[in-house]
Image: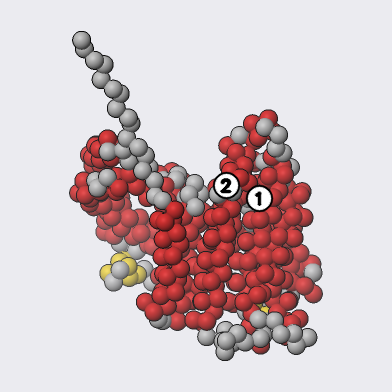
């Protein structure tokens, strides 16, 4: 009598436990604490402080875009208003000789961001999609123009300055040295990141995802998508206000540039490049964009052009951002198959570097000819002298671009084949995410 073999259970999907999740946050706290010992220069401390502010700002924007599906072109409004209210609160506390410590001032910025987002959000959140984006842009322009209309509050073109060292000292810290400011920003960055992550794990966070995916179905189950969008918008404004407050403390200044269109563009850029679909994405994007802004601005006058090209490349070839690329490799990494990909990636890196070198050479020569003709025709790129009026460097740039593009097409099939084999092997072991 033949027996029917029992059906084998499917491989269980392995997920990190709660201990691993707590370990990540502990590691992040330790990293924030030890970074000043690894990078001791004043420039490094300044850049790391800017990164902490940018992380809070980008994560607050991701509450709108990544969690609730609202594309806003005016998120810097709440960042800037948080900065202005903080500066005025600091000056008022000093004038009244109130014993208020500086570490509590970001609460003022957060409340200012929350209040302004609640007022403006009530106007903009009834609509979604393109209509919401256009309304947010209009409100941003309205607030931006107010900096010249209301100079008593916004300080005109010069802005409003303050002195952070005149507030109540905490444990002997007057927050004059940059390292003390860094630790203040790092502490607030960690607290805000934990709170925003916890928000994504709540039922409200899940409802935001539902509104993002299908607002009509949310109505069918008895929820009002407008109210969900309004609450998410207000919370995003709260954390953006905290980020703006920290920026005001760091710079000891609040001016109209803080809620400009460029500031809103930076946070959109960071979120898209990092990846709005994952919580870690805006963090990666904020760190990368801040570092590139600090480094590229010292190397080239057209650094904003490189940012635009980076944004276009991310949207076209990595719509999931850096976090999406990393998470795509996660099952292969857990299955121990990353070593299979290294030779293929190394092969692809050669033509990619050719394209990069050709693009940089062409951009820098064109920018020099267009913007600095009075400085002569010879420029130095990576230590090499190039005559922009000679045909040789132009031919070299074109050859690198064309040759690199051809080699990419030739090697891409091999990379895809190796990737498919590695992913199939990971899935066979039960690693799907």
Find residue 30 and report its horizontal and vertical position in percent. Answer: 42, 70
The colour scheme of the drawn protein is secondary structure
Asked if marks 1 and 2 touch (Cβ < 8 Å), the reply is: yes
Q: Would residue 9 appear left or right of 200 to someone viewing this image?
A: left
Q: Would residue 421 appear left or right of 38 to someone viewing this image?
A: left
Q: Residue at x 54, y 55 (%)?
A: 197
Q: Secondary structure at mark 2?
A: helix
Most distant residue in the top direction: 1
User: Front-most of 21 and 282?
Assistant: 21
Find residue 118 and report its horizontal and vertical position in percent. Answer: 74, 55
What residue does disc 2 label? 67
User: Front-most of 310 and 278?
Assistant: 278
Q: Residue at x 31, y 38 (%)?
A: 430
Q: Would residue 253 appear left or right of 153 to someone viewing this image?
A: left
What residue does disc 1 label? 232
Most distant residue in the front direction: 1
Q: Residue at x 49, y 46 (%)?
A: 277
In this rendering, is residue 44 above or below 218? below
Q: Secondary structure at mark 1?
A: helix
Find residue 155 and report its horizontal and vertical position in percent. Answer: 74, 75
């Amino acid at each position: 009598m033949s027996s029917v073999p029992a059906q084998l259970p499917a491989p269980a999907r392995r997920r990190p436990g709660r201990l691993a999740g707590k370990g990540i946050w502990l590691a992040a706290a330790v990293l924030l604490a030890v970074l000043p010992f690894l990078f001791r220069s004043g420039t490094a401390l300044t850049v790391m402080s800017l990164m902490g502010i940018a992380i809070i700002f980008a994560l607050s924007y991701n509450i709108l875009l990544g969690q609730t599906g609202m594309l806003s072109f005016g998120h810097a409004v709440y960042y800037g208003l948080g900065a202005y209210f903080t500066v005025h609160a600091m000056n008022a506390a000093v004038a009244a000789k109130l014993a208020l410590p500086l570490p509590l001032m970001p609460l003022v910025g957060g409340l200012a961001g929350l209040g302004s987002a609640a007022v403006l959000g009530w106007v903009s959140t009834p609509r979604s999609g393109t209509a919401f984006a256009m309304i947010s842009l209009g409100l941003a322009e309205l607030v931006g123009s107010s900096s010249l209309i209301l100079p008593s509050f916004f300080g005109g073109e010069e802005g409003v300055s303050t002195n952070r060292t005149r507030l109540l000292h905490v444990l002997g810290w007057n927050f004059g040295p940059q390292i003390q400011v860094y630790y203040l920003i790092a502490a607030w960055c960690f607290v805000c990141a934990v709170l925003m992550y916890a928000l994504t794990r709540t039922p409200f966070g899940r409802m935001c995802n539902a509104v993002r995916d299908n607002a009509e179905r949310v109505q069918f189950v008895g929820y009002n998508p407008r109210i969900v969008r309004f609450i998410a918008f207000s919370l995003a404004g709260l954390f953006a206000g905290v980020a703006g407050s920290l920026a005001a403390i760091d710079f000891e200044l609040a001016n109209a540039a803080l809620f400009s269109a460029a500031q809103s563009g930076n946070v959109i850029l960071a979120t898209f490049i990092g990846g709005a679909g994952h919580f870690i994405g805006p963090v990666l994007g904020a760190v990368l964009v801040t570092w590139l802004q600090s480094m590229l601005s010292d190397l080239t006058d057209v650094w904003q052009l490189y940012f635009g090209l980076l944004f276009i490349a991310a949207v076209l070839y990595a719509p999931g951002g850096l976090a999406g690329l990393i998470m795509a490799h996660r099952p292969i990494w857990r299955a121990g198959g990353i070593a299979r990909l290294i030779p293929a990636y190394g092969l692809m890196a050669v033509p990619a570097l050719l394209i990069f070198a050709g693009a940089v050479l062409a951009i820098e020569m064109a920018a020099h000819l267009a913007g600095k003709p009075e400085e002569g025709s010879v420029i130095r790129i990576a230590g090499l002298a190039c005559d922009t009026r000679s045909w040789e460097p132009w031919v070299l740039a074109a050859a690198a671009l064309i040759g690199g593009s051809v080699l990419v097409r030739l090697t891409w099939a091999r990379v895809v084949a190796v990737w498919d084999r590695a992913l199939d092997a990971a899935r066979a072991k039960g690693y799907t995410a």
